[in-house]
Image (spheres, rainbow, N blue to C red):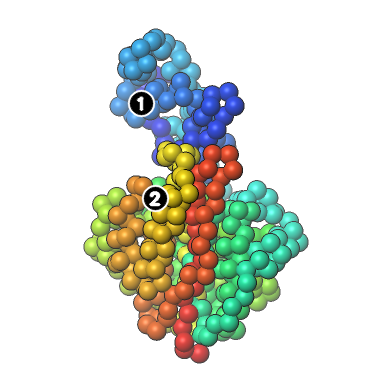
């Protein structure tokens, strides 16, 4: 194949491998590619040059110089063909697959439960039992005055985050007034976004039944947006950060009627520049619209953020953390959570953005967005309900996550 191959913006993680020691796995967080791509170390000097600037001949020559050996152009071309067929490269093959996927997604009445049967039980009875027995029952109940108006919950897969989800949704169940009929859910977008937020005008399906969308609320936010709020709507297709919240909410609510407002939070430009999102007029005006919506539904709405914290260790390019490093990570995470609990959005943003390349907190945007959205809830206070570091048994990589509740004293 000719041309200048360009790798798509996909997620890459390092995982153990019996044959090669470690391999790089490419995962399409947008959900267009049907599978993963596994790259042994010997192929990295080649694939790292799939930047849209080099021809196959140039890639072969530069990679050969890097390793001090000979890499045939034919090898590069075969790799290009395989990654193109696997939908990991920009170009006509991917564009055609994207068009088909977009059409199918737009035509679907609900956003499918993409991870059911994998990240959590796909059978309604099994899921209900799992949430009740392995999540909520393992979180010790505490007496609290006031009602919950905001919730930070994990978005790690429920198999690993059971206790954290239990603290989050068990507490919500005990403090949820009958009047609440709307859940504004901010999720992390693990796939790149061109706009700061992505709305979706359809509900989320779950094995327990759908969480329908509040179309009027979505329409109001879309009308107020000074950017295209549906440009990145396809990111909802495979994104798990809202899907997991929808499943827990459906279990908590049972047959009770309620609607969600699903919003993926990217804020990529603000994160890249390490500057306050409020400095972007488009973002500021969207937050103003969100706060107007929340203010108009006081007593009826709960704001939720599906957000994990740090991602560190070998899978993310670090050495394994020892006991002291894990303790230091917890201390830093809790400093961030303390700023969030105090509802100081600026301090929270600055603290997390300050070491974003080291801690890799993927929940920065949704938690910050939740804090902005809670501004009309002037008297609400935050409380850290649970903190946990989930450690990979194979290589010691760590994902930290927490449950944080925000409570209002108003009836």
Which residue is rendered at x = 43% and y = 18% of the image?
Answer: 76
Q: Secondary structure at mark 2?
A: helix
Q: Quadrant of residue 316?
A: top left
Residue drawn at point x = 42 percent, y = 11 percent = 72
Sequence-wise first label, 1 or 2: 1
Residue 124 locus on image (x, y percent): 73, 60
Circle 1 or circle 2, nearest the eye: 2
- Residue linked to disc 1: 49
Give residue 359's mark. 2
Residue at horizontal 47 percent and vertical 87 percent from the top: 409
Q: Is residue 263 above or below residue 159?
A: below
C-alpha distance separating marks 1 and 2: 27 Å
The single residue placed furthest to the right in the displayed view is 125
Give the quadrant of residue 379.
bottom left
Which one is nearer the viewer's eye here, 254 or 411? 411
Mark 1 surroundings: few (<14), some (14-19) or many (≥20) residues within 10 A: many
């Amino acid at each position: 194949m000719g041309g200048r191959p360009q790798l798509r913006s996909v997620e890459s993680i390092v995982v153990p491998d019996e044959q090669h020691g470690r391999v790089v796995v490419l995962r399409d967080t947008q959900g267009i590619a049907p599978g993963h791509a596994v790259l042994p170390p010997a192929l990295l000097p080649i694939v790292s040059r799939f930047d849209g600037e080099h021809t196959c001949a140039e890639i072969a020559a530069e990679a050969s110089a890097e390793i001090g050996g000979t890499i045939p152009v034919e090898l590069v071309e075969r790799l290009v063909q395989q990654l193109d067929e696997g939908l990991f490269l920009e170009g006509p093959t991917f564009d055609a697959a994207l068009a088909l996927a977009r059409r199918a997604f737009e035509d679907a009445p609900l956003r499918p439960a993409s991870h059911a049967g994998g990240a959590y039980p796909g059978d309604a009875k099994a899921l209900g039992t799992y949430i009740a027995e392995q999540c909520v029952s393992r979180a010790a109940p505490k007496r609290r005055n006031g009602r919950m108006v905001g919730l930070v919950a994990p978005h790690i897969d429920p198999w690993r985050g059971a206790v954290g989800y239990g603290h989050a949704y068990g507490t919500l169940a005990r403090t949820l007034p009958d009047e609440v009929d709307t859940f504004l859910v901010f999720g992390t977008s693990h796939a790149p976004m061109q706009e700061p937020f992505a709305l979706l005008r359809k509900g989320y399906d779950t094995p327990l039944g759908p969480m329908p969308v509040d179309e009027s609320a979505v329409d109001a936010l879309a009308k107020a947006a000074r950017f295209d709020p549906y440009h990145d709507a396809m990111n909802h297709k495979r994104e798990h950060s809202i899907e997991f919240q929808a499943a827990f909410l459906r279990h908590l609510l049972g047959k009770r009627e309620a609607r969600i407002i699903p919003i993926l939070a990217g804020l990529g430009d603000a994160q890249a520049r390490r500057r306050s999102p409020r400095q972007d007029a488009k973002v500021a005006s969207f937050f103003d619209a969100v706060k107007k919506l929340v203010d108009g539904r006081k007593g009826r709405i709960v704001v939720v953020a599906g957000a994990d914290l740090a991602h560190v260790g070998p899978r993310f390019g670090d050495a394994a953390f020892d006991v002291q490093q894990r303790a230091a990570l917890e201390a830093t995470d809790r400093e961030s959570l303390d700023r969030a609990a105090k509802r100081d959005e600026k301090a929270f943003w600055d603290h997390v953005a300050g070491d974003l390349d080291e801690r890799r907190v993927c929940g920065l945007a949704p938690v910050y967005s939740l804090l902005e959205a809670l501004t009309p809830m002037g008297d609400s206070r935050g409380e850290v309900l649970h903190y946990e570091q989930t450690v990979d048994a194979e290589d010691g990589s760590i994902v930290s996550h927490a449950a944080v509740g925000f409570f209002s004293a108003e009836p």
